[in-house]
Image: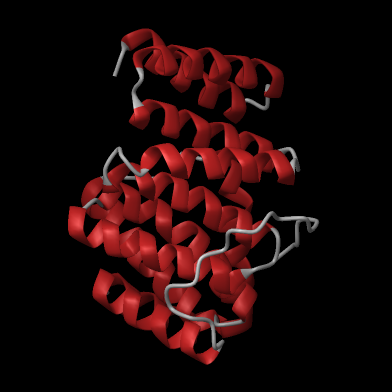
Amino acid sequence: MSRPSHVEHVFGHIEHALGNETPARERFVRSLELFRQLAMPSGIGIVLSGMAVLELATGNADHTERLLDEATSVLQSAGPWFMTWSLYVRAIREVRYGSPDHAIALMRESLTRIRLLQDKFALVYALVPLAAAAVLKGDDAWVARIQGTRDAITERTGVTVSDKSVKDLQQQAEQETQTRLGPDRWAEAYTAGRTSSIDALLKDIDRVLRKGRLPIDSRRTGRAARRPASL
């Protein structure tokens, strides 16, 4: 990636993490302009996805959708790794707007790509919306297994989620499920998750999607016009 365009992109995320929405948006716009000048699909798509995260956090559903549509379009030619970030953002959006089945279906698509790429970084991120969707589905044991899987990968690789805009999803998922399951059931499910695999995650996803009668390859393409839902 071009150094100036990449630097602007990184600083956009830093400003967003600090809660500085206007400077973050300005950084992303400059980065996007530079990547467009370079005609670099991967850079364009990643920046558009970052902008979508910002707009989602500020409650701008229509703009979020437009940015995600454009990001998905340009990332189709950038390779499977880059699509995992767009799928992650879409899944976060679905959780925020109360559509757990669609979030789970998106993460199924992402996990099939991650399995192919053996990408532990993307896997740790993908488990955030997956766990949040499992909370909305009321499947507490599954939430505990997902979190066990995430923590085990983090311990082995050092990969952590730096996206502060989803910190509430992580904390709420853990607190609520621990309370409902109790310490013994939580520990049992969490321990099982620590030895889990992507194949096991996909089997759980297929079980949940079949139970919800949502096609396994279902994708949400319509505009989100709802208000964010709390977990």
Task: From this view, report whether residue 210 is shown above or below residue 228.
Answer: below
| Total numbered badges shown on the rendered structure | 0
> In the picture, which quadrant includes the C terminus?
bottom right
Color encoding of the figure: secondary structure
Q: Is residue 152 visible?
A: yes
| Left or right of 34, for residue 91 | right
Q: Identify the residue at image location x=67%, y=27%.
A: 19
**The quarter of the displayed image where residue 192 is located:** bottom left
Residue situated furthest bottom in the rendering:
211
Q: Position of residue 140 (x, y in %)?
A: 55, 80
Which of the pair 225/194 is nearer the observer? 225
Which of the pair 153/39 is nearer the observer? 39
Residue situated furthest top in the rendering:
4
Task: From this view, report whether residue 82 is shown above or below residue 148.
Answer: above
Residue situated furthest right in the rendering:
227
Q: Identify the residue at image location x=57%, y=63%.
A: 220
Q: Identify the residue at image location x=63%, y=41%.
A: 66
Q: Position of residue 226 (x, y in %)?
A: 79, 58
| Left or right of 105, for residue 1 | left
> In the picture, which quadrant includes the N terminus?
top left
Q: Position of residue 116 (x, y in %)?
A: 19, 59
Q: Is residue 161 visible?
A: no
**The quarter of the displayed image where residue 18 is located:** top right
Q: Identify the residue at image location x=38%, y=26%.
A: 43
Q: Position of residue 32 (x, y in %)?
A: 49, 19
Task: From this view, report whether residue 212 is shown above or below residue 118.
Answer: below
